[in-house]
Image (cartoon, helix red, strand yellow):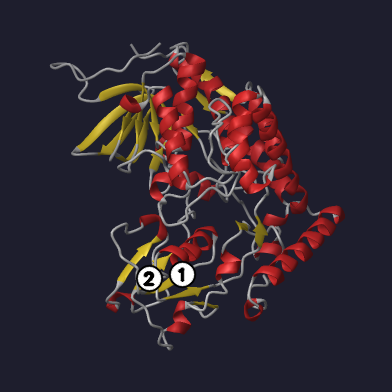
Amino acid sequence: MLAPSKPRGYGSSDNTFYPMVILGAGMGGIGMACQLKDKLGFDQFRLFERQSGIGGTWWINRYPGVACDIPAIFYSFSFHQNPNWSSFFPSGEEILRYQQSIIEKYQLIDKIQLNSDVVHCQWDDFKNEWEITVRHLVPEIVRCKVLVSAVGGLVEPRGWPSDVTGHDKFQGEIFHSARWNENINLSGKNVLVVGTGCSAAQIVPKLLAEKGVKRVTQVMREAPWVVPRLTPPFGDEGWNKLAPRLFSTIPGLMNFIRKIVAIQIDATFAYFGASESSQRAREKLRDDLLAHLHKTAPTKYHQILTPNYDVGCKRRIFDTDWFPSLSDPRLELTTLGLKSMEEREIPCDVIILANGFEVSSWFHPLMVVGLDGKSLNSVFDKRGGPQMYKGTALDGFPNFFALFGPNSFSGHSSVILGLENQINHAIKLIRPLLQNDIAKIDLKTEAALSYNQEIQAALKNMLTIRIACCGKAGHVSILHGLTGMYHGLCKAVGREMSVYSDDLPS
C-alpha cells in the first residue's frame, strides 16, 4: 500500500503527499474513511474540513429545532447502527453525537484537519497525482494519488435576495439559519423569517415556544406540501421507551425494522411517475394532504397554504409542529414578497434567512480541474447540465471520485443509503490504485455519455423533471428510480473504466 510522505529537505518535493485525500468530514467523508479502514485495511488518508467542527450539514445547521426528518434507524450507516436513539426523529445534536461515536470507534480523529478550505484541485498528468491548494493557517499545497469529494449540497447558504434593496440600512441582525447566531437573545424581539422550507418549519415553532419572541412574521413565496411525519411502531412514546430495550435484547430486530422503514419510504416513489396509476396515487395523496392542512392549520391560511403545483414537484415538508404553530396570535404568515413588503411597515428587530442553499453549481465553491485544463463545471456546461457516471466519476478526471454526485439520490429516501452505495462502488475502483497496481483510472467518454442518456430518458417519465410540473426541463440531481435500484447499479464495475498501469512514476 502507498504511504504518506513529507518534504525531506534538499532535492525533495516541497509538498506533503497523501495516497488519498477526502474533502469534507460530514456523513460522506466519515463513511468513506470508515470503509477504507474496514474493507481495505487502509488508513493512509487525510480528510480536510473547511468548518471548525466535524459533522458536515449537522455541524453547520445548529438552529433551534433542527432535526432529522427521515427516521434515524434509516438515517444511519448499516455498519454502525445505534440501538439507543432517544426518538424516531432525533435532534441534530444527537446526530452529531452519533457521528462522534463513529469517529471514536474507527479512530479517525487524527486523520481530520479542520479549518482547512480546499479551494483548487489540479490533475498533474505527468506525475499521475492531484495537486490540491488548501487554505489553513497559511496556504499549503498537498499532493495525492486519489481524490474523493464528499462535499455536500447544503454548504453555501443563499444570500439576501438580489432583487430586494435596502437591507444594508437595516439596523438589526440579519443571519442565515445555517449560520445561526448562538449568542443572540430573541426574547421580546420582533422576528422576520424568510422562507417556508424544511428549516423554517422547524425554526418557527421553536421561536414561539422556547425563545420568548414578541412577534414572528413569516414570508412565504410558495406554499409547500406538508406531510404528517411517519408514526413509529408502538407510537412515539412507546418507541422512545421500548425500542432501545428491544433492540438490545432481540438480535436482528433493529435491522428488520430498518428494512421495513426503508421499504415504506421507498414505496412513495410510486407517486413520482408519469403513468396513470401514479397520477391516481398523487391525486389520492393530494386529497389526504389537503385534509391534513384543513385539520391542523388555521382556516384563515387554508387558501394561501394550498400549493399550486403537483405533489412531488418539490421536496415535501415532514412536520408535526409548523401547522399547529400558525394558530399562535404572535405569528403572521404572509405571501407578500420582500420586495412588496418594502411598501409596508413591519415591526422587525431580527431577520432570519431560511431560504435554502446555493445548489446551482456542483461542488461550489471548489474548483476541480482535470485533463486538458477543463474544470468540472465547464464540462457540465458543455454537456448541458451536471452529470456523472453513477453519480461518482466523470471522464477526463482520473483518480477522482465524488459522493453526493448528480443523479445519485432520490430526494424522498435516506441520503445515507445512497452514500453507502456510492462508497462501495468507489472503493472497488480505488483499491488497485492504493495497492499501487495501477497508476490511474479514468472513465471512458462513451460510457459517460451513454449512461447519462439512459438517466435523462428515464427522468422524462418522472414528475420532478416534466415541464408542466416545474416550469422547465433539463438535468436534475435526483435519482431516476428506487434507492434499491441504485444499489444494483453501483454493484457493477468493469469495462466502463480505462486503466493505466504501464506508466507508474518512479
Residue drawn at 59 percent across, 44 percent down:
88
Q: Are marks 2 and 1 in contact (CB under 8 Å)?
A: yes
Query: Which of the 4 image quarters holds residue 6?
Result: top left
Q: Name the amino acid type tagged 2.
A: Ile
Q: Name the amino acid type tagged 1.
A: Val
The answer to which of marks 2 and 1 sits earlier in the sequence is 1
In depth, the one of 115 and 208 nearer the eye is: 208
Task: Kindly identify which numbered label has been placed on residue 194.
Answer: 1
Residue 440 in sight here? no
Residue drawn at 46 percent across, 50 percent down:
154
- Image vertical order of residue 484 relative to residue 203, above or below: above
Name the spot of residue 387 as percent of width and height, x first. 57, 43
Task: Kindly identify which numbered label has been placed on residue 145.
Answer: none
- Image vertical order of residue 72 relative to residue 79, above or below: below
Residue drawn at 45 percent across, 80 percent down:
339
Name the spot of residue 159 as percent of width and height, x first. 39, 63
Q: Regarding mark 2 in the picture, which secondary structure is present there?
A: strand
Crowding near pointer 1: few (<14 within 10 Å), some, many (20+)?
many
Q: Which residue is mark 2?
A: 351
Residue 240 in sight here? yes
Q: Regarding mark 1 in the picture, which secondary structure is present there?
A: strand
Q: Residue furthest right?
A: 276
- Image vertical order of residue 54 relative to residue 377, above or below: above
Query: Which of the 4 image quarters holds residue 266?
Result: top right
Q: Is residue 212 left or right of residue 277?
A: left
- Image quadrant holding the N terminus, namely top left
